[in-house]
Structure formats: structure tokens, C-alpha cells
Image (cartoon, grey):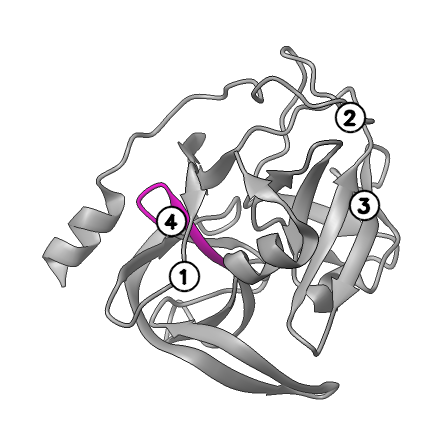
């Protein structure tokens, strides 16, 4: 297990960087702008918060991925709990037919690097996406509870929500705390998924469940960058 965790973390940590050259986009990033990354928290209209999974893009715009059960609850998203800095608007939400949604970034005064936040002012550059496999080393990152690592324990898992059953998730032995929902799961520099739900906590232990990011990319025609 220790070797697996070491392998999962054997990747470069990078300081804040600007987003890559932008496509023609409403939210074309500025090189000197404050950044919004995967793992950062966004705040919705109704007084709730959810973490971004990954920043993605198509030929026209930049987006952030969120669980569908978060994305469907707000049309507008903000970078701060006081809701003074608007980041973007909900572009779509799927739940419980999957658990994924999309925010289209609309604030050109912010930048949207292809990195994820793992806490402590450190970031990992995500360079691709893949399907998870059982036994694979996996880590999760986030602005609140930082990085934690473990393994993928099952794939193609069904989880019951009050709204219905979500199929096709993968399970890990990573613990989770309130505020981690939506955050990214990754292996090395490869994106695997974003958190859909969890049991337990990081004091008593537990499991967490993730929506595979490859399904989201295929559904919307998007790419990791």
C-alpha cells in the first residue's frame, strides 16, 4: 500500500500558472488574473457550496465540472461565500442519470488553469483523463482537506440517492468530509473522476464514490488541458 501511495504522489507540484493559450472564448483568461482551479469551492445562489472537479474546455469556452446534484441547484456561481465575484453559469446538469454538470466560465478577469488544488498552496497540473481500474492508486485533492491517497476498490457501482439510483460510479477507500463534494480524484497527472458521495468521515474512516470524468468529457465534447 505504501508503495502504491508513493506512486500516486510521484508527480510534480507546481506554483500558480496561467491557463494555456485560450480558444475564442467569453471567458478568455488573463495571465495575471486570480485563478479558479479544480478542487476550489464555488458558491451557488441558494447558500450552498460545491467543489469543482476539473477545468475543461471546447473550441469556444472554458468550463468547470461539478456533480449534477450540485449543478442543478443554482444557475449562477461565485468564487466567494459573499457572492460578490461571479465565476460562471450552469451549462447543464445530469442527475440521477449520472451525476455530472457543467459551469461555463464567464468572468474574463479570472484565469482557469488546467491544475487542481491539493491544499497548502500547492497544485498539480492535470494532463489527461482515463477510466479507473480496480486496485489503481488514486488521490483526491481539495482546498478544504488537502490531498489523501488510497486505491480504487470497485468500478461500475450503483448508489441510491433520494432522487433515484446513479449508476456507473467508482468507489475508493478515500475518506471525505463535508465540503469535499465535487472534488477531483486523480492518479499521477491523470484525471479519474469527481466526488459524487461518501460514507463516514476522515476521523472514523469511510469510502467515497466518484463520477468518472471520461463520461463527462464524452457527453459534452470537452477536453482536459
Q: Residue at x 27, y 36 (%)?
A: 11
Mark 2–mark 1 Cα distance, whole angstroms, equals 29 Å
Measure how far apart labels 4 and 2 are at the Cα level. 32 Å
Q: Is residue 213 magenta?
A: no
Question: Can you identify the residue that label 2 sits on?
Answer: 25
Q: Residues within 10 Å of mark 3 (few under 14, many from 20)?
A: many
Q: Is residue 35 above or below residue 155?
A: above
Mark 4 or mark 1, which is nearer the start of the sequence? 1
**Residue 41 locus on image (x, y percent):** 64, 46
Image quadrant assignment for residue 196? bottom right
> Given this view, does label 3 or label 2 mark the residue nearer the observer?
2
Disc 1 marks which residue?
131
List the residue tagged with mark 4: 147
- Mostly what secondary structure, the magenta segment? strand
Residue in the picture at 25% in, 44% down? 9
Nearest-to-viewer mark from 1 and 3? 1
> Residue farthest to the top?
32
Question: Crowding near pointer 2: few (<14 within 10 Å), some, many (20+)?
Answer: some
- Give the residue number, with chain letter if any, for mark 3: 77
Residue bounds of the magenta highlight: 187-193
Pick the quarter of the image with the N terminus. bottom left
- Percent x, y for residue 31? 63, 12
Amino acid at each position: 500500500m505504501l508503495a502504491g501511495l508513493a506512486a500516486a504522489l510521484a508527480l510534480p507540484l507546481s506554483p500558480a500558472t496561467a491557463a494555456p493559450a485560450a480558444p475564442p472564448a467569453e471567458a478568455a483568461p488573463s495571465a495575471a488574473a486570480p485563478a479558479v482551479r479544480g478542487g476550489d469551492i464555488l458558491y451557488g445562489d441558494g447558500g450552498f457550496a460545491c467543489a469543482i472537479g476539473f477545468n475543461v474546455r471546447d473550441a469556444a469556452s472554458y468550463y468547470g465540472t461539478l456533480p449534477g446534484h450540485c449543478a442543478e441547484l443554482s444557475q449562477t456561481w461565485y468564487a466567494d461565500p459573499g457572492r460578490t465575484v461571479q465565476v460562471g453559469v450552469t451549462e447543464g446538469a445530469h442527475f440521477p442519470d449520472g451525476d455530472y454538470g457543467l459551469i461555463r466560465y464567464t468572468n474574463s478577469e479570472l484565469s482557469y488553469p488546467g491544475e487542481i488544488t491539493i491544499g497548502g498552496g500547492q497544485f498539480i497540473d492535470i494532463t489527461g483523463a482515463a477510466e479507473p481500474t480496480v486496485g489503481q492508486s488514486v488521490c483526491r485533492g481539495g482546498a478544504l482537506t488537502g490531498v489523501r491517497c488510497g486505491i480504487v476498490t470497485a468500478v461500475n457501482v450503483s448508489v441510491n440517492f433520494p432522487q433515484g439510483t446513479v449508476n456507473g460510479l467508482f468507489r475508493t477507500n478515500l475518506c471525505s468530509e463535508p465540503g469535499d463534494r465535487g472534488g477531483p480524484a486523480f492518479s499521477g497527472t491523470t484525471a479519474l473522476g469527481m466526488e459524487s458521495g461518501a460514507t463516514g468521515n476522515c476521523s472514523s474512516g469511510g469510502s467515497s464514490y466518484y463520477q468518472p470524468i471520461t463520461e463527462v468529457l464524452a457527453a459534452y465534447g470537452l477536453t482536459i488541458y
